[in-house]
Amino acid sequence: MIIAIDGPAGAGKSTISKLVASQLNFQYIDTGAMYRGVTLKCLRLHIQPDEVSRKIESMQTEIRMDGEKIFLDGEDVSQEIRSIEVSQAVSAFSTIPAIRLFLVDLQRKMAVDQDILVDGRDIGTYVFPHAEIKIFLTADVDVRAKRRFLEMQENGGSVSFEEIVANIESRDRIDSQREMAPLKKADDAIEVDTSSMSIAEVVAQILSLVETKQREGMNH
């Protein structure tokens, strides 16, 4: 089974997805982390967004997910990909078709022969349009910024709340206006607004949707 969870920056996708995946014993694939991994590599190599299409083949990038950890060319970069530098650059790099095609191919290969839960921006619309369950997770901008702010503080970041609001608004704009596979709710996705919900409530709602779906499957 494939569960696709899409939504804008800071909607709680990765937190919720990790919990749901571990409850269901599904492999969790954090596509946002994969885009951040490629972005980090481009920043390290001083490759500009407009050079990526020419250089992606020669970059020889290997991305591997292991539980919640992400490895870039064998190195654990789970912490480094969450830096503000990567956060500010990731939307510009993830709009590049060459990067999207490279990662989508990788994501589809990961889905072969296993139950997976994938979160991102275009999973239900583009990567796995035939996913059995599609959720569109959203929340008010201020709520999303507050969550991101607390997350950054916990990780020792020194970013102002205003900077995070600006970063989220700009990412929303870039993600929903890009030409290739923009952020949008799939026609058959169930929208869950997490603004006034606790993490436990969101997890419970998604688990009950999965349970209903699995029961329907057994009855067919």
Image (tube, grey):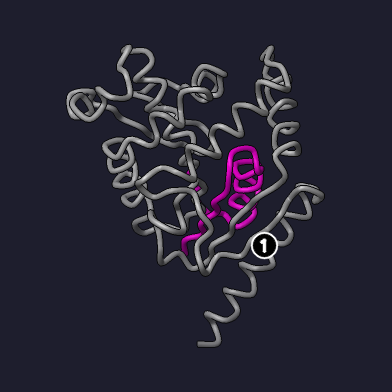
From this view, report whether residue 10 is shown above or below residue 206. above
The residue positioned 55% from the left and 24% from the top of the image is 82
In the rendered image, residue 213 lying in the magenta stretch gets the answer no
Give percent across and percent down for residue 1: 47, 64
Question: Which of the 4 image quadrants contains residue 157?
Answer: top right
Q: Is residue 46 above or below residue 35?
A: above
Q: Which of the pair 1/140 is nearer the observer?
A: 140
Going by the picture, which residue comes out furthest to the bottom? 220
Residue at figure coordinates x 34%, y 52% from the top left? 108
Q: Is residue 146 left or right of residue 8?
A: right
Q: Does 176 appear above or below 136?
A: above
Kindly identify which residue carries mark 1. Answer: 207
Left or right of 126 on screen, residue 141: right
Q: Which residues are magenta?
A: 1-29
Verify whether residue 24 appears in magenta: yes
- Point out residue 158 in the picture as x, y percentages from the top left corner: 69, 12
Which of the 4 image quarters holds residue 14? top right
Residue at the (32%, 24%) spot, across then down: 49
Report which quarter residue 136 is drawn in.
bottom right
Q: How many marks?
A: 1
Give neighbour class at mark 1: few <14, some 14-19, many 20+ (Cα, 10 Å). some
Question: With 20 as the anchor, is 154 left or right in this view?
Answer: right
The kind of residue tagged 1 is Leu
SS at mark 1 in the image: helix
Residues 43 and 172: in front is 172
Q: Position of residue 93 (x, y in %)?
A: 38, 29
Viewer-nearest residue: 212 or 99: 99
Of 163 and 61, the residue lying toward us: 163
Q: Position of residue 105 (x, y in %)?
A: 29, 47
